Amino acid sequence: MGLFDNTGLDPNYTPTDDIWQSTLDELKRRGIEVHGSLSRGKVDDGATAVVLKAAETGSRRVVAVKVYKQPNQQVLHRNGDSIPMTNFFENERRMLAGLQRCPAVPRYFYSVDTASALTTQTIQPFHVMEFIEGQRVTKFAEESLARDNEQRTERLINLFQDVLKTIESIHQFGYLHDDGFR
């Protein structure tokens, strides 16, 4: 098994579908190497961002890079206002920096937006942070539910308790997690 043994990743997905060449060039300038075969470098993606598994060229430290897909997009806020996607990026940047002592949050290394890019080209904003090897909570829960045994209930209760402890830990730092609870 190598540094990027991503056998669980979708081999047909190509992150360049979501990431601009100028953003990939910026990552390279900063010494971030997305695994050679980009089609196997994806970890996860959502409506607003894609997360890649990468490595720093010099140290070989494995990192996660979260790239905002369409930074110029306007998003409908829950209060009804239309706000730029970059607001979410800036809010996440501040939150990650503010939660560095919280054990439930990956270590945040830095963020880059067009204003702080090493190039004059427009790039998609991105965060570089600690890569945490593991499985999505939802996938773990689905697999636990699929099992028909006595341990299923205990595993799900333990998972739920862990999620509640994590949310409590984030609250202690003055943040509220509301993702998906609208």
Image (tube, rainbow, N blue to C red):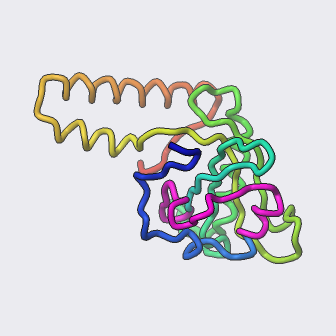
Q: Nearer the viewer, residue 129 or 86?
A: 129
Of 119 and 100, nearer the camera is: 119
Left or right, residue 140 beside residue 166: left
**Residue 15 position within the rendered picture, expressed as x and y whole percent measured from the top left:** 56, 69
Q: Give residue 143's position: percent from left, percent from top.
A: 25, 41
Q: How many marks?
A: 0
- Left or right position of 51 against 90: left
Which residue occupies the extreme front position in the image?
Answer: 1
From the viewer's side, name the closer residue of 168 and 125.
125
When asked about the image quadrant of residue 102, the answer is top right
**Can residue 114 be seen in the rendering of this structure?**
yes
* Magenta span contains residue 43: yes
Q: Residue at x 23, y 22 (%)?
A: 154
Q: Is residue 182 visible?
A: no
> Which residue is depicted at the point 60% across and 34% down?
105
Is residue 5 inside the magenta stretch? no
Q: From what the image shows, is residue 71 above or below residue 32?
A: below
Name the residue rendered at 83%, 63% in the picture. Answer: 29
Residue 182 placed where, x, y %?
42, 53
Q: Give the answer, above or below, for where 98 lies relative to 182.
A: above
Q: Identify the residue at horizontal 49%, vertical 45% (top origin).
A: 178
Q: Position of residue 33 (x, y in %)?
A: 70, 57
Left or right: residue 145 versus residue 165 is left
The magenta segment is 24-49
